[in-house]
Amino acid sequence: MTVINPTRSTESLAASPSRSGLPVIAVTGMAFEARIVRGTGVEVVYAARADLLERALSAAVVRGCAGIISFGTAGGLAPDLQPGAVIVADAVEGPLGHCATDSRWSERLAAALMASPVAAKLRRGLIAGVAAPLIGAEDKAMLHRSSGALAVDMESHVAGAIAAAHGLPFAVCRAIVDPAWRTLPSAATAGLRDDGTTAIGPILRELLKQPSQLGALLQVASDARAAKASLVEARRAMGVTGALVSAG
């Protein structure tokens, strides 16, 4: 699914589209992440299923863009990262190989965040890409030990591979939602649809089958609020400074 917001936002003039006149493509896995990042000079592509995401992103690239940024939430791998920590990645390592981010664009994004309320939460480093959700704390610890990655998501490696194939600048900005030590209850992922939206029915059915999940699910909701708040602040900072649309 591709979402384009053609209206002008209240961001500063510095946040106008890149000098090429082309938008930056923001890649997310979920609809709420897409709502946060959309704005002037940004075309948003989102889907939870990799093939749908790849198809939509490839089509958006054909229409023209100045760069690709992977934006949204991520699972924590480094044990010191709390929910709401923000990662500007130096590279992504995943099923499609190693993909470095654009150093100049990443530096501009990091500088914008360092001047914002999320400055104390900012980290730089490697993001791991996976093809399926990483649910368990033991699995996260194993991936951290083997890769050294700070966090993990399911979209950044797809975005990076397509950016590399087309010679486009690539960046990653992700906020930690579930920390490394947290094992997610099955209800937490039950409602995620392929298109990145969430259905309440499957979540309620999981809770009815196993009511003991409720406490863990409430904790996940609290973690998600922290991650969302950081993404909102990060998006605001990157928009005001123009760093988001200053690809390459």
Image (cartoon, grey):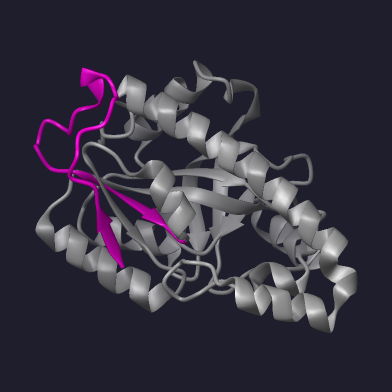
- Residue 125 coordinates in the image, percent (x, y): 57, 41
Quadrant in which residue 37 is drawn: top left
Query: Is 185 situated left or right of 134 in this image?
Result: right
- Residue 12 coordinates in the image, percent (x, y): 27, 19
Residue drawn at x 27%, y 44% is 169
- State whether residue 134 appears in this view: no
Which residues are the magenta region? 1-29
- Residue 195 coordinates in the image, percent (x, y): 41, 72
Residue drawn at x 18%, y 59% is 61
Quadrant in which residue 106 is drawn: top left
Quarter of the picture holding the C terminus: top left
Residue drawn at x 49%, y 24% is 113
- State whether residue 105 appears in this view: yes
193 is within the stretch colored magenta:
no
Q: Main secondary structure of the magenta part?
A: loop
The answer to which of 210 and 40 lies nearer the viewer is 210
- Residue 41 coordinates in the image, percent (x, y): 21, 38
Q: Give the total number of marks visible in the rendering.
A: 0
